[in-house]
Image: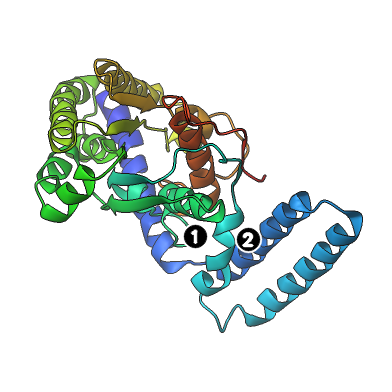
Amino acid sequence: MKNKRVTWMSILIGILLLSGCLYLLLQDRNQTQVESVKAVASVKRDQTESTEDRASEVAKAQEEVQTAQVEVSDKPITENIKDKVREVVEVALDFFKKDQKIVAIGDSLTEGIGDETENGGYVGILNHTFEDNKLNITVENYGKKGNRTDQLLKRLEKEDVASAIKEADIVLITIGANDIMNVLKSNFMNVTMEPFQEERVKYIERLEAIFIKVNELNPDTQIYLIGFYNPFERHFGEIKELGMIIDSWNEAGKSLAEKYDHVRYIPTKDLFSNTTLDLLAEDEFHPNTTGYKLMAQRVLEYLKEPNKETEINSVEVPS
């Protein structure tokens, strides 16, 4: 049994390392850019009210696609896509409470690693959505790649992060994936559930300390803990232990959040499960832009619920 665990875990680690190298070496900018322009054309077409305008937008989009194909070697991807990210989410926010500040803290999922547009992942999408709807809602991103719960807890002592939280109406958190990966790396030669269960206890202790610290900095802020998805499902779905670990840690975070009136848990696992959509970046771990769109949509759905003044009538992510 141990040899079997060693074999599949060695394969897993090898594939993850290889995927990371491929991610750095292979950037298919041409395809990404053309697909992004096509997606924008689709959104514009849906937003157009008349047949004439729709035809005009289609023609314009086709011209943009041709231009993108010609100029892709001369312009970096961010220049061509930067202004188009704002259109990925359509949302009616007419009744959203004005003059709010959202602060996002956590790991690479908050920073937006994997987002081909390099506009900050789900946090950037939220920011652009508010800007497009001319809402006076500021969004600040303090995500840092590689952060574990212990590292985030220390970063809450830093003046810039602490000052931002003191003024925040909402704090969004993604944290814990690197805690899991740290256990995986330390035990990949003999993986059992026991070390993950032991570390989960410590994870909950540190996560609770994070909640308490944020509340000390700002007793009036609402905290949202964003849950884990399973990045291994597509290639290692037959390894049930990985799914069990993700579920166990998600349940622990959800149960802790339910202890506090000012903390809510936002699930994401279902967004990435049992789908034919390509939702992961080339590293096969972080979400791609489409995956972050789904996360942004889910977060928007939860943001509307606690506030009686808040009503998000519709949230739509283009296919």
Q: Position of residue 244 (x, y in %)?
A: 36, 20
Q: Amino acid at mark 1?
A: Glu
Q: Quadrant of the N terminus?
A: top left
Marks 1 & 2, CB-CB < 8 Å contact = yes
- The label on residue 36 is 2
For mark 2, give the secondary structure.
Answer: helix
Q: CA distance from mark 1 to mark 2?
A: 10 Å
Task: Tell me what residue is drawn at x 35 percent, y 23 percent.
Answer: 241
Secondary element at image label 1: loop
Looking at this view, is 222 or 38 the one in front?
222
The residue that mark 1 highlights is 116
For mark 1, does the 10 Å Cα neighbourhood hold few (<14), some (14 to 19), or many (20 or more) residues?
Answer: many
Q: Residue 159, how many percent across, how many down?
A: 11, 53
Q: Nearer the viewer, residue 2 or 85?
A: 85
| Quadrant where the image shows the C terminus | top right
Q: Amino acid at mark 2?
A: Ser
